[in-house]
Amino acid sequence: AKSTDDQQKALLFQVLAELYQYQLNDLSKAEFFYKESYECHPSRLSLLVRFSQFLKKKKSFDELLDVLEKTNELNEKQKQLPQNDPKKIKSLSLWLQLEKSYLLARHFHQIDEAAMILQKLLRDYPEESFYPLIKMFTQNQKWDLVFNATKESLLHHEILSDVSVIMRLQLLCHLALFGVRDVQEIIPYAQRLLQKDTQNSIGLQAITLGYTQKQDYHGLVESLLSLVKGQPHHHEYYSIYRTIGFVSKERLNNYKLAESYLALCFQHSPQDNMVAQNYIETLEYLQNFKDLVSVYEQLVAIPANNKDKAIWYRKLGSIIENDGKGQEEQAISYYRQAIELNSDDVLALSNLGRLYHRTQRW
């Protein structure tokens, strides 16, 4: 070893250090040879990276922080050399800053200093630095910082994948739903989330709660309509159609609008009890008995308990009986089916008796 130059010595000592570390598990000798290698060639980046990994495993955190800082200084100097690969330098810079931030947060409890490193990285590495930063803030319950960092990362949406943007928007909506942020502040982000993912239940909850707190039901319906206007009717808009229908009926008394969207929901999912009930009430209010008959005919055809089916048959009988088209036989048939399913249905028994009397069936 004495006959070789310093660079060859450094390489030899590094090989010995790695041999003792990985093959012989002798950390004391490994550390000795890493330091010898460093003394021979302190500007060897690959050595410093391996040495820092060794110190991390050995939990020598004070020394590790020093080596990380020296490695970063050396890496920054490499930028000036034209023969070096900029991508490798950038990648190593990211790794070093992430490692330093972890070290400061976990072992030195310097949360603010670690956060400053990650926030600087957020501008250049919005994808790689975002989750470590959010994890750090979340673990320390710094919710305002979570919100601000997430908002800032969305400024780089052009270099983020759609999945990453959706996850960030969803995080903002979560913060509002958990009461950490004012839900009204989240409305634009919820709208943007639904534009990218129309089936996102978190986004729909957030936008609904935001407008509801403002008691701006017109704004809610208009916002949701803007998402589906001009789009072909599709099951992926089901939850949005459902909300438009319910809010239009219950809050705006706009039964015609409610009818349109509840009809789409019922066509897709007649077994949705809330949709069926609200659609029936809407059709009754509008006295649209033709469609009401169609709804009940579809309901009796799907699996349900006997009491519910009995009610639907009785309702069918009542509509047919009173439509003035002389369909007493059909009405009688419906009432009898209701009674067969539930013999305790007093209204069906009463209606059938009255109809028998009217048609003189003694």
Image (cartoon, helix red, strand yellow):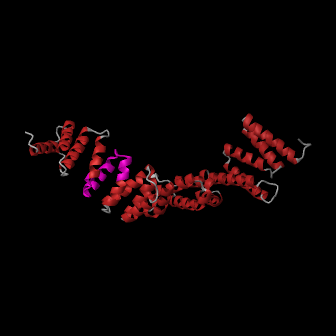
Which quadrant would residue 159 be assigned to in this image? bottom right
The structure residue drawn at horizontal position 18% and vertical position 52%, both measured from the top left corner, is 324
Residue 251 in percent (x, y) is at 32, 61
Residue 15 among those drawn in magenta = no
User: Which residue lies most toward the right here?
Assistant: 3
Residue 266 among those drawn in magenta = yes
The structure residue drawn at horizontal position 74% and vertical position 40%, both measured from the top left corner, is 28
**Side of 259 relative to 59 (left or right):** left
Stretch in magenta: 263-289
In-front residue for pair 20/290? 290
The structure residue drawn at horizontal position 72% and vertical position 39%, both measured from the top left corner, is 27
Residue 294 in percent (x, y) is at 29, 48
In this orientation, does residue 256 appear?
yes
Instruction: Please say if 358 is above or below 341.
Output: below
Which quadrant would residue 133 be assigned to in this image? bottom right
**Side of 339 relative to 237 (left or right):** left
**Side of 73 relative to 239 (left or right):** right
* Magenta segment main secondary structure: helix
Which quadrant: the C terminus? top left
The structure residue drawn at horizontal position 70% and vertical position 50%, both measured from the top left corner, is 63
User: Which residue lies most toward the front here?
Assistant: 326
Which quadrant: the N terminus? top right
Residue 280 in percent (x, y) is at 28, 51
In-front residue for pair 31/291? 291
In this orientation, does residue 214 appear?
no
In-front residue for pair 184/241? 241
User: Which residue lies most toward the top here?
Assistant: 24
Residue 141 in percent (x, y) is at 50, 55
